Amino acid sequence: MASYEYIESALILNLDTKEKIRDFKYGAKDFAKHGDAYNFLMNHFDKYGRFPSKEDLCDNYPTLDSSAYSSNFDYSLEEFKQHVLERTILSSIREKVGRDGSRVKENPKKVLSDLMVKLTDIDVDFDEDVEAYDDGNLSRLDDYKERTRIREMGEGLMGVRTSFSSINTQGVGWMPGDLVAAFARPTIGKTWLCVHAAATAVVQGKRTLLVSSEMPIRAINMRMDVVLGRMLNYNFSHRNLRYGEPINEVEYQRFLEESNTKSLLVCDHIVGEMGISLNAIAGLIRKHNPEFVVIDGVYLISVSQGSKQAWEQSHMLFYGLKNLATSTNTPILVSTQANRDASSMFRPPKANEVAFGDALIRASDVAISMCKVKDSEDKRLVQFQKYRDGHLHKDLTAMQWDINYGDIKELEDYPVEIPNDMEGFRNNQNF
């Protein structure tokens, strides 16, 4: 383990971005040697809005080891944590036991009890998997102020914009850690909904990962051209693109040049695997750090190589997806399909009509069910079967569904007719 002086010098000389300062959870009292230098750094940043130069730091605090600047910040931070933990443990033992052990002789049972409580508190403080509810940290107040600031700006939407105005008008879109599930019978349009969700995020400037277990990248990209093109005021025909029928090639070239960004990543296979696994998706998320993830055809995603029963695999998949969303602080939208029990094409499937839907609906923060509308091929009926931590002004809505030209949007004033077999169903979701 490197010396206190070197590691603390490395941290102070490399604390040079707002992100590092935000994630640094320690104060001057946690430094063994260079607490004053840390205070100087923070005061300079608070006063001038910028960081002091390495030269200024070393001139004002010549005990800083300037050679430590070349050290890796993440490595130095981990070493610093170990140093702080070591000093905290030793200090606590001395406090409870006494420097000469005299307190143990006076009342060994009480000393043992006090020491165990103290060490347990230290374990909680330094356990990165748990967080004390009330530790004097005002970050939640700062978070609230940031939400207020966002609501007062522009459209006032926090999170990733959704495909539904019913949700967006709440002021909160897909939030970090959300798991959103969409399900329908085959041919209803799950893939188009996934493409539209991804395109909506991309237009908002969110880095998006779209994983398809059902369709090749070429087919997904073609649909994305139509939907994203519509959002950018182009008018491409999916049929014409797919079958090579006449299009305005100049417009298509302009669109492709305009949308040539790295903000959308599309995946239809994982190199070295027979299929797409949950672990492989987790690897992609950690590698590319997207702000939004869409997985089309989640029922084809494998969980492990073991011989577990199908229900256990599905339970692991859905709760694994929720854990993945939470651990990576990323909203994830997944699509799956209803089984044969959902016989009607004109009623949104119930959760129990989706394979292992109980696990899916319980793991999800939002659950969306979709079906066709009678006598309207270019419409879809959408039911919000679950919306955690909030209330929507309606749980049933209609969507414009002209997929040939990518015209997909919620219809505000469309008269939604409740299918007969939904009576007694729509308001009795016990999730």
Image (cartoon, rainbow, N blue to C red):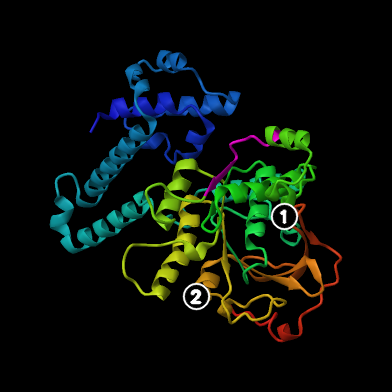
Which residue occupies the foreground of this view, 368 or 16? 368
Q: Return the x and y of residue 145 as percentages of the image width and height.
A: 65, 47
Q: Position of residue 307 (x, y in %)?
A: 31, 70
**Residue 130 seen:** no
* Residue at image coords 51%, 38%: 22
Residues in magenta, as a range: 258-267
Residue 171 is tagged as 1
Q: Amino acid at mark 1?
A: Gly
Cα distance in 3D space between marks 2 and 1: 32 Å
Which one is nearer the viewer's eye here, 138 or 95? Answer: 138
Q: Is residue 160 left or right of residue 40?
A: right
In the image, residue 161 lies at what x, y percent? 68, 51
What's the amino acid at mark 2?
Answer: Phe
- The residue located at (23%, 44%) in the rendering is 90
- Quadrant in which the C terminus appears: bottom right
Identify the element where label 2 is drawn.
loop
Report which quarter residue 336 is drawn in. bottom right
Relative height, residue 238 to residue 300 (above, below): above
Judging by the rendered image, the residue that carries numbered circle 2 is 356
Q: Which label is found at residue 159?
A: none
Tell me: residue 170, above or below residue 307.
above
In the rendered image, the quadrant that contains the N terminus is: top left
Q: Would you call the spot at circle 1 few (<14 residues within 10 Å), some (14-19), or many (20 or more)? A: some
Q: Would you say residue 98 sits in the magenta stretch?
A: no
User: Count the marks: how many?
Assistant: 2
Horizontal placement of 136 versus 304: left or right? Answer: right
Tag 2–tag 1 contact (CB < 8 Å): no
Residue at position x 41%, y 46% from top? Answer: 271
- Residue at position x 35%, y 20% in the image: 64
Give the class, few, some or many, for how many residues have Cα within 10 Å of label 2's Cα (few <14, many ≥20).
many
Q: Secondary structure at mark 1?
A: loop
